[in-house]
Structure formats: C-alpha cells, structure tokens
Image (spheres, rainbow, N blue to C red):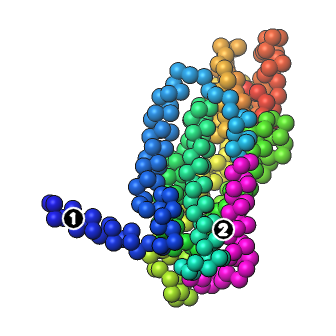
C-alpha cells in the first residue's frame, strides 16, 4: 500500500513538473488543490451552510454592493478581452492553428498573464451565487448555475498550468466578451426599477452564450481536422467542455423561453378554479394575502425584470381589493408589484 502511494505521489509530481515553468510560482498554480478546496467550499456554502444561515433571517438588501461588483466585473473582463485581443487575435493570431508560445517574449508572457487573470475571475464570480443566497433568491440557484461556476475554474487550471495562450486563448477571448455584456446587464438591473425598461435584451445573452459554445466546438473540430501540432488532450477537453455547457444552456433556453412562450398562449381565466403554471424565474414573494373571494388564492409578487410569465401579468381587479391595498397592488410586471393567481 505504501509503495502504491509513493508511485502515485511521484507520478503526480512528474505531472506537475511538466507544466509551463513561467506560471510555476504564480499563486494557486503549484497544485490544483487550492482551487478544488475553494470550489468545494463554494458548493457547500450555496447548498448547505448559506441556506441554513439565512433560514431565519431576512433577505439582505445588497443592490448598491451588487451594482459596484457587477460594473467592476465589466471592467476586469473588458481588460481580459482587450488584452487577449491586443497580444493575440488583433495582432496576427491564427484561428486555423495557433500553437502555444512558451517563450519569455513580451507578447507570449502577457498572453499567459491574461489567461491567469481570466482564471482568477472565475473565483471572484462565486459572488454571483453568494448574493443569491444572502438575498434568499434560492430559485435562481439552478443546477446549471452551480455546475457552471464549479467546473469552469477547475478546467481552466489545467489550461493555465500547461498551455496558457495559443489555441487555448480562444475560449477566454470569447467568454470575457460575453461577460462584459452579461455583467453590464446585471449592473443595470441592480440599479433599480427605473432601469428595467432598458433590459429587454436578456434572452439575447443566452443566444450569445449558445453561439459561444458552438464556436468553441467548431474550433476544436477544426484544430483536429487541420492536424495542428498541439495537444490532442486539450482539444478533446475543450470540445467536451463546450459540448457539456452547450447542452446545459440549451436546456435552460428551452425551459426559460420556448416553454414559457407556449405558456403565454394560454390566457388564465379569472373565474376558473384551474391553477396556471407557476412563474418560472426572477420572482420573489413579498407577502401572502388571505383569500379575497372564495374562488381565488392570491400572492403579492414582485418581478426582478421584464422576463415574466404571462400568467403573472394580470393585476387583481380593483373590486376585489380593499381600498387600502389598491395602490400597492396595481401595476404590471415591469418590476412593479402585481398578483399571481394560484
């Protein structure tokens, strides 16, 4: 048993020694275990410790902090996108076949640093989910969200450790651009309801994310077809990574937009006892009300953006609301309070 452990330890050390010497002494690059520990702590917090901590507490109001965080992430991702572009794709990088430059030349080293910065941002992005937990937005902590935030930093470690730059810069280049747009959206959303009218383009971000993964899949296939003298392992890793997330994001798109679009074709009746399908996402229950009539159960509801299920878009008729509640309940789903029939 002891001999087996020695062999495994020696094999692992040899594996690490084969990494890019330029990044060997950079923080978190000596071993994958610090990153793995942070990922494990993240999963434990968002799935166990965080919900337990918030169970008997009121949701935190974090709009100001979230706005600052999101616009900071816009800036950092813009730096990564422009950096990779300047030292690579805007300056002669080939989309057909671009081997990794392991030299200490200025551009090659800067490209490795841009990749490393991109890697570090993936741990900062854990804050996305932490904010959901502290604001008790548990419905937004989907399997896709947690899987995405867990797998990406884990897989990126290998790219930065063994092949920073070259063909491996393609995904960070695309993804940082997508995140500039995404965090701009979230930053505006965090600034309050008066900005909701500018946020009609949410679903187009999902289009762009899907297109991103399609581009990475096609790029990996082209590298193989062109018989590029680069690591087959990384080509396969990039292909599987992109294929996995394409499937997850496609499922999210179908659940969020295609099925929702079909649901909107069904107009709920105010005199029916049938229950419409519940709102899908981006809704927070504010309070619960007693039944105003024998035929309805109602819930005061608040949308966080315009992306709202049509079943929630029917304000309660004024004759069913007491005078003291009319002002609070009137409105549509553009960030204002309205009622959901159950």
Please tell me whether the stretch drawn in magenta is mainly helix, strand or loop. helix
Magenta-span inclusion, residue 55:
no
User: At 74% across and 48% down in the image, what residue appears?
Assistant: 71
- Mark positioned earlier in the residue sequence (2 or 1): 1
| x, y percent for residue 330 | 82, 24
Secondary structure of residue under mark 1: helix
Residue position marked by numbered label 2 in the rendering: 173
| x, y percent for residue 217 | 57, 72
Residue position marked by numbered label 1 in the rendering: 6
| x, y percent for residue 154 | 47, 58
The front one of 210 and 66 is: 66
User: In the displayed structure, does residue 19 sit left or right of residue 119?
Assistant: left
> Start and end of the magenta stretch?
71-99
Magenta-span inclusion, residue 80:
yes
The front one of 139 and 266 is: 139
The front one of 36 and 210 is: 36
Mark 2 crowdedness (10 Å alpha carbons): few <14, some 14-19, many ≥20: many
Residues under labels 2 and 1: Cα distance?
40 Å
Residue 7, quarter of picture: bottom left
User: In the displayed structure, does residue 334 sit left or right of residue 162?
Assistant: right
């Amino acid at each position: 048993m002891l001999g087996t452990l020695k062999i495994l330890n020696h094999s692992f050390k040899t594996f690490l020694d084969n990494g890019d010497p330029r990044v060997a002494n950079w923080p978190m690059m000596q071993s994958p275990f610090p990153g793995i520990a942070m990922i494990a702590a993240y999963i434990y917090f968002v799935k166990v410790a965080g919900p337990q901590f918030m169970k008997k507490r009121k949701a935190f109001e974090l709009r100001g902090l979230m706005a600052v965080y999101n616009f900071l992430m816009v800036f950092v991702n813009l730096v990564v996108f422009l950096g990779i572009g300047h030292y690579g794709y805007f300056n002669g990088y080939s989309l057909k076949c671009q081997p990794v430059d392991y030299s200490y030349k200025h551009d090659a080293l800067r490209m490795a640093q841009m990749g490393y910065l991109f890697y570090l941002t993936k741990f900062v992005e854990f804050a996305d989910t932490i904010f959901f937990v502290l604001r008790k937005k548990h419905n937004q902590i989907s399997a896709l969200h947690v899987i995405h935030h867990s797998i990406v930093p884990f897989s990126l470690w290998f790219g930065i450790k063994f092949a920073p730059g070259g063909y491996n810069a393609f995904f960070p280049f695309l993804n940082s651009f997508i995140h500039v747009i995404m965090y701009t959206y979230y930053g505006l959303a965090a600034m309050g309801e008066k900005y909701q009218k500018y946020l009609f383009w949410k679903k187009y971000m999902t289009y762009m994310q899907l297109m991103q993964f399609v581009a990475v899949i096609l790029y990996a296939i082209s590298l193989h077809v062109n018989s590029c003298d680069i690591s087959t392992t990384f080509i396969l890793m990039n292909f599987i990574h992109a294929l996995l997330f394409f499937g997850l994001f496609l499922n999210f798109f179908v659940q969020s937009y295609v099925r929702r679009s079909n649901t909107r074709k069904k107009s709920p009746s105010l005199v029916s006892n049938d229950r419409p399908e519940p709102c899908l996402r981006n809704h927070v229950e504010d309070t619960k009300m007693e039944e105003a009539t024998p035929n309805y159960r109602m819930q005061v509801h608040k949308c966080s953006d315009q992306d709202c299920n049509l079943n929630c878009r029917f304000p309660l008729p004024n004759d069913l609301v007491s005078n003291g509640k009319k002002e609070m309940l009137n409105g549509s789903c553009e960030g204002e309070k309205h009622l959901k029939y159950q």
